Image (cartoon, coloured by chain):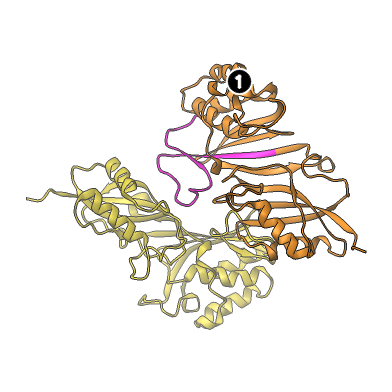
Chain colours: A orange, B yellow
Amino acid sequence: MAEALTRYLIRIEYDGTGLVGWQRQDNGPSVQQFLEEAAEKLTGQPTAIQGSGRTDSGVHALGQAAHLDVPAHLDKRAVMRGLNAWLRSDQIAVLSAEQVGDEFNARFDAIERRYLYRILDRPVPSAINRHRLWHHKVPLDETAMHQAAQHLVGRHDFTSFRATQCQANSPVRTVDALTVSREGDEIHIIAIARSFLHHQIRNFAGSLSLVGRGKWTESDLKAALEACDRSAAGQTAPAHGLYLTDILYPEQK
Amino acid sequence: MAEALTRYLIRIEYDGTGLVGWQRQDNGPSVQQFLEEAAEKLTGQPTAIQGSGRTDSGVHALGQAAHLDVPAHLDKRAVMRGLNAWLRSDQIAVLSAEQVGDEFNARFDAIERRYLYRILDRPVPSAINRHRLWHHKVPLDETAMHQAAQHLVGRHDFTSFRATQCQANSPVRTVDALTVSREGDEIHIIAIARSFLHHQIRNFAGSLSLVGRGKWTESDLKAALEACDRSAAGQTAPAHGLYLTDILYPEQK
């Protein structure tokens, strides 16, 4: 008889550079594939890893969450250490493992997703962080950006900020918080919601940058939202400025 | 008759990963080589670039300084933009250019050099910053490290913390400040002096880590200094945790 399985919630950091994103794809290496290969080595059997959601190619994570089932003799230390030991990419690290109930689902049980978008606001591109943030040559007004962003908070039809290929049934989402602040020569956009549409935060960042450089007013951003038309909003900001920072589950609230 | 030349002080950021360091070498690409090639494109003639000092292979810079002479019709904006436009590596960025007198020398006129050494102090290596800091699995006591570091401040014979291949005439240097502090799960060591010996800060970091993990007391560090023997001190910490952050010249003091 097969050994009983225990379900674990793991937290994952990754550098998305050169990866096709979270989800397995035919066209290149994914975080899920690396993790599932490590899990198979650890458990000795094919092991599915279910993430809290996808991230695009090039997007980073400081705290992606996922669940997997492992033979019950492995404790949380063995799961964390074993996955890291078997991972064939140093772009991925398992930060923690925590036992959860058999019904726990990293995708469906998530009650809050948190993202950070980093913009470098100076004349010269970054050498050190060139794959870690979006470079903007033109000075940005973070106060105007923050004020305009408040029109995007709350429950709205976000068709204007949704990728045309987005597969969600509804374009309606509730954004719990959207803040813009300056940290030295960086602009940080923090976005919090139960769930987001495809490209939603990168599209927020693209439109907010228009406000920041004075091309759009607060009212222009509001009008773009109300247009319910993707072509009414600004560009999709590049993937490499985006970080999935945290996923919250009920017991953490 | 050739056009008159104007001397410029430039500030440079670089990611040292995969480079042989600041100085031109036969065995791989250097920051100096990339900059001199860009300068030749900009000025139309071979142009030497003199740095404030060398950095080892893998060491990063947020504010390296150097000087070069360019035809007088180029203003500071043209120098900064032109060098960046011609640079064939996105690991290097020229942050600023400032006109200086014909006698200015980036190496000999420097009155203060500032470095940062970053240690990641957590069980799991960093995925995002794996080429940007030294990973320490074992918890470090930054208070003990800071206290012990104060024995290294002042004028001393630093033979114990000097690379055996160091070419300086004297092992005596004056360390103006050496501080150790915690920033979340990182330990930051900041070192300030007019000049340092080869590997001096990486050797400080290696020995201070012994204090941080409780293997050495403050007195052990003091004894290592007084031994004037490289083998009495700890390991050389890896290059990729070290950042040259700033070079000061008299007019800035």
Q: Is residue A119 visible?
A: yes
Does residue B89 appear left or right of residue B46 in this picture?
A: right
Q: Residues within 10 Å of mark 1 (few under 14, many from 20)?
A: many
- In the figure, A146 relative to B216: above or below? above
- In the figure, A228 relative to B46: above or below? above
**Quadrant of the image occupied by residue B24:** bottom left
Q: Position of residue B19 (x, y in %)?
A: 42, 63
Q: Is residue B153 visible?
A: no
Q: Position of residue A249 (x, y in %)?
A: 80, 42
| Predominant secondary structure, magenta span | loop
Q: Residue furthest left?
A: B1
Report the number of numbered marks. 1
Residue drawn at the location 62% of the way across and 66% of the way down: B145
Parent chain of label 1: A
Residue drawn at the location 67% of the way across and 44% of the way down: A245
Does residue B49 appear left or right of residue B237 in this picture?
A: left
Nearer-the-camera pick, A73 or B33: A73
Nearer-the-camera pick, B228 or A157: A157
Q: Position of residue B76 (x, y in %)?
A: 28, 43
Q: Which residues are magenta?
A: A114-141
Q: Residue furthest right?
A: A1
Nearer-the-camera pick, A104 or B215: A104
Residue corresponding to mark 1: A225
Nearer-the-camera pick, A212 or A49: A49
Is residue B37 rendered magenta in the image? no
Three-letter code for the amino acid on which mark 1 is drawn: Leu
Q: Position of residue B204 (x, y in %)?
A: 53, 70
**Quadrant of the image occupied by residue A183:** top right
Is residue A128 rendered magenta in the image? yes
Residue drawn at the location 64% of the way across and 43% of the way down: A55
Q: Secondary structure at mark 1?
A: helix
